[in-house]
Amino acid sequence: MKMTLTQLKYAITVANANSMNEAARSLFISQPSLSAAMKDLEEEIGIELFRRTNRGISVTPEGEEFIGYARQVVEQYQLIETKYVNKEQVKKKFSVSMQHYTFAVNAFVEMVKQFGMDKYEFAIHETKTYDVITDVKDYKSEIGILYINDFNRQVLTKLFREYNLEFHSLLECRIYVYMWKGHPLAGKKEISLEELEEYPCLSFEQGNYNSFYFAEEVLSTYEYKRLIKANDRATMLNLMVGLNGYTLCSGIICEDLNGSDYCAVKLKSDEVMTIGYLVRKGAGISKLGQKYLEEISKYKDKALC
């Protein structure tokens, strides 16, 4: 028996559903037929794709890699079918995943404006650090935007190698305190961590991968007296105003998106962060990707370093 496109589609559906029954319903086939097809596929390729328990199924690490390749094969087939069989005009796709950087969103906006949406389909994922990495690994995004520094460099670089990814530097930045302009410390030229002790530090929630190495904020191991975790940038901004909270950032401000009510004040620290882009090793960057990176590179002059 040889692996089929149908089996690949089945495997992707099961991975998305995390349930054989739910996947079978969406595919309009019986659950035993789907289970048998997945067993046959696993036997042929010699790896276990899914772990089966009484509570459902989960994708194995080997399965995650296989599903990533399967998605690419199925998507390429669908493009061929759409263009050459159905004779439809296919839109080129570009997707990027990133940590929560306003300037990276703004660069995406400028890139979309230049290319327009008539011939292109765009996607942007502002998400957790580990998801940025796996999105690129699994072909969900062409480019990932994140930072490394002396603390997380060894751990993240090892992960990049394991996932066959490459990291390229874009911006070198010192650390700034991001807060609303009504904050009691907003008028200072420089702020120490000691001065910030009475105010809540705001940190992005990292889900299951909440190791210090995956934190979006530098100085993640510092013993903060007050710490609040949040999931999105809008909530962060509200907490800055409501509780005089703050977060640590690159100092690159985009008032067009966040408004003019916030400011960045230099932190008294020698810490440096390198913001860069992640791509699959050996993969060429599309014209859309090149333009996106070009837009981000414009912030080199705006970085408060």
Image (cartoon, rainbow, N blue to C red):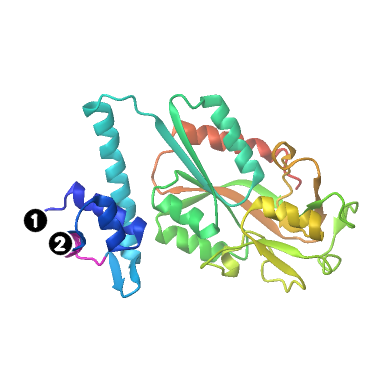
Q: Secondary structure at mark 1?
A: loop
| Pick the front one: 65 or 163 | 65
Q: Which mark is residue 40?
A: 2
Please provide the residue range marked out in magenta: 35-48
Q: Outermost residue toward the left?
A: 1
Q: Main secondary structure of the magenta part?
A: helix
Residue matched to label 1? 1
Left or right: residue 88 versus residue 153 is: left
Q: Which residue type does callout 1 highlight?
A: Met
Measure the alpha-carbon separation of dots 1 and 2.
8 Å
Image coords of residue 110 (percent x, y) = 60, 31
Based on the picture, tell me whether residue 292 belongs to the magenta stretch.
no
The earlier-in-sequence mark between 1 and 2 is 1
Left or right: residue 9 versus residue 61 is: left
Q: Residue at x 69, y 39 (%)?
A: 257
Left or right: residue 264 versus residue 162 is: right
